[in-house]
Image (spheres, rainbow, N blue to C red):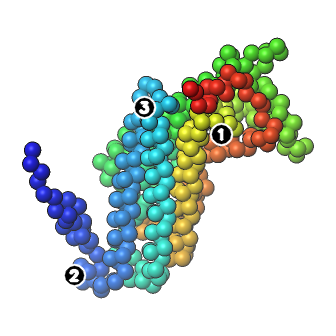
Amino acid sequence: MEHKPVYYGEYLQLDKIINAQFPESEKEGNAPAHDEMLFIIIHQAYELWFKQILFEVNSVISIMSKPTLNDNSAELQTVVHRLQRTVTILKVLVQQIDILETMTPMDFLDFRDMLRPASGFQSWQFKIIEAKLGLKFEKRHGQEYYISQLQQKEIDIIKAAEDGSSVIELINSWLERMPFAEDAKYWKTAEGENFWTEYESVYSNSLSDAEKNNLAFYRKIFFESEENTERTLGPKACRSALFIMLYRGYPMLELPFQLLDTLLEIDNQLGNWRYRHINMVRRMIGTRIGTGGSTGAGYLQGAMDKHYIFKEISQLNSFLIDRRKLPELPNVLTEKLGYGF
């Protein structure tokens, strides 16, 4: 087929994007507010980036939802790459607040009251991102406001996302099938010990007197499977994740470690975004309620404190030990974890 020439503006649909700003302050009967244009464009940019994040996260979920994920193929690298791109986008979202903060509180008051009851709380795309990453409704702060201001079609989309597979659930399934620290063929000793028997002994000896209670917590995290638990990572998945963290220097575990580390960085950047958002809201409106009726900075503070999606991975750092005291892996296992010829 003959290639039809593509024109820049038509390809990017610039006529729609550039002409999609309609400030309330410029409507008949209102006094024009110069900074409302900035306010609109910043939030439109946020929503476009949210769309790209969803595009990346959906692709990761699609790859990880396959019956088997080949860890020794390009699939795992693709998952890591797209999640790392998500991290970079989140960093841009944080940096955009610098631009928004060029608007003073008085500049904002020129048009703020015209926006009611619109609010960033109505960003259904952001709620979908949280749901697809793994934030469950029952773990949300301010559940009474969660969907109260959304249209029904948006509520349906969010609930469908909550009912589908999330990244953290798929990570749990992926970790649970990792064999290295569990397979008896790698851990045959005269005493019948396995890796975790030896590791618990070393970990216990590394604890100070003030930390001795940590041993009970260690056993609960890695070996107790409770009914009706709020955990998103099961004991076996936690053991696999810790093993990856401990022996990440081996080639076979390099990408798995990057995956876990990238998930922690997603939480970190979401936390940074919320923190900057809180400070900006306090600077702009102090203790006043939000335009959507929330408690403003108070709500945002509660969400920042509670909405850590991958905290069960981050807490595994509590159980690391000095690398010089790590149990020595059997040769048959190190051959599996290294480069084979």
**Nearer the viewer's eye, disc 1 or disc 2?**
1
Residue at screen point 44% across, 47% down: 82
Relative to 191, is 33 above or below?
Answer: below
Q: Earlier in the sequence, mark 1 or mark 2?
A: 2
Residue named by callout 2: 28
The image quarter in which residue 4 lies:
bottom left
Look at label 3 and name its amino acid: Ser
Q: CA distance from mark 1 to mark 2?
A: 65 Å
Secondary structure, mark 1, is loop
* Residue 66 in sight from this viewpoint: yes
The extreme front residue here reads 341
The spot of residue 210 in percent (x, y) is: 88, 46
Secondary structure, mark 3, is loop
Q: Residues within 10 Å of mark 2 (few under 14, many from 20)?
A: few
Q: Quadrant of the C terminus?
A: top right
Secondary structure, mark 2, is loop
The spot of residue 79 in percent (x, y) is: 46, 41
The extreme left residue here reads 2
Residue named by callout 3: 65
